[in-house]
Structure formats: C-alpha cells, structure tokens
Image (cartoon, grey):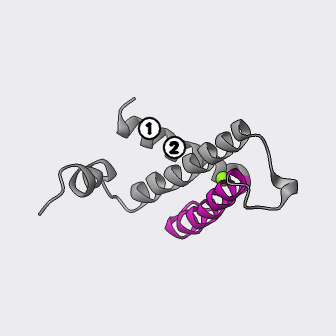
Amino acid sequence: MQFTELQEKLVQNLVRYGKKHKITIDEDFALFKLFEEVGELSQAILTDRKKSRPVKHVSKEESKKQVAAELADVLGMVVVIAHLMDIDLEDALDKKWINKEK
Ligand SMILES: [Mg+2]
C-alpha cells in the first residue's frame, strides 16, 4: 500500500468516526486526540514494563499488542493532522529523516 492510499484510508476512517459520534474533525480535535493517544501509549509502555499497578499487568504478548495498537493510534493521528494541515508527510519524512537536508 502506498503512503497516500494509507493516508486516505486513515482520514476516511476518522471522518466516519466523527460522523458516527457527531464530532467535528478539525486540527484542534486531531491535536488533542494525538495527546490522548500519546498518553495511552505511555500507559501501555508502563504496563509492558510492569511499572503500573499490578492489577493492570498482562502477559508480555498482550502488552506488546497494546503497545502496537497505541503506536498505530499515535501514527494515525499524526497522519491525519498532516492531511488537515495540507502537509505532504511523505515528503517531510524524506527530507527530515531519510535525505536530511544540510
Ligand atoms: Mg488509543
């Protein structure tokens, strides 16, 4: 799957979510949702490292699934924010991470 196709699917998914729950999907929503997802990722990693309350502890396999799911949520929101702000994220990644401009 190409990046643009992935981005379109992620955006369409969030638009459906917005319609279903009567939430306006705009830059403010996406940014605060990203913060929420980063918090959930932190919680999942703390659980994975057994640095949370013991009642939250799960198997290593399950905690890895939880971390993966939250990483996906964080990345998804970043991709949506790029779309909403009309930023070519693939190009930005290339310039910033791959072919770093000097
Ligand atoms: Mg989440």
Q: Which of 61 and 28 is in front in this view?
A: 61
Query: Is 83 on the left or on the right of 52, as rendered?
Result: left
The amino acid type, in three-letter code, at marker 2 is Leu
Q: For the stretch drawn in magenta, what is the main secondary structure? A: helix
Residue 56, by quadrant, is bottom right
Is disc 1 placed on a helix, strand or loop? helix
Q: Nearer the viewer, residue 63 or 81?
A: 63
Give the vertical position of 87 relative to 72 (above or below). below
Residue 16, by quadrant, is top right
Q: Which mark is residue 53?
A: none
Query: For the view shown, which residue lies furthest in the right direction?
Result: 55
Q: Position of residue 75 (x, y in %)?
A: 49, 51
Residue at image mark 1: 6
The amino acid type, in three-letter code, at marker 1 is Leu
Count residues near mark 1 (Cα–Cα under 10 Å), then give few for <14, some for 14-19, many for 20+: few
Q: Where is residue 32 in the image (x, y as percent from the top left)?
A: 59, 69
Q: Which of 45 and 25 is in front in this view?
A: 45
Count residues near mark 2 (Cα–Cα under 10 Å), then give few for <14, some for 14-19, many for 20+: some
Q: Are marks 1 and 2 in contact (CB under 8 Å)?
A: yes
**CA–CA distance between discs 1 and 2?**
6 Å
Give the vertical position of 87 relative to 9 (above or below). below
Is disc 2 placed on a helix, strand or loop? helix
User: Which region shows up in magenta?
Assistant: 21-48
Q: Quadrant of the image for the N terminus?
A: top left
Inspect the magenta stretch and tell me whether residue 44 lies in it: yes
Inspect the magenta stretch and tell me whether residue 31 lies in it: yes
Q: Quadrant of the image for the C terminus?
A: bottom left
Q: Position of residue 58 (x, y in %)?
A: 79, 45
Residue at image mark 2: 10
Q: Which residue is drawn at 83% across and 61% down?
A: 53
Query: For the view shown, which residue lies furthest in the front direction?
Result: 50
Q: Which residue is drawn at 49% across and 38% down?
A: 9
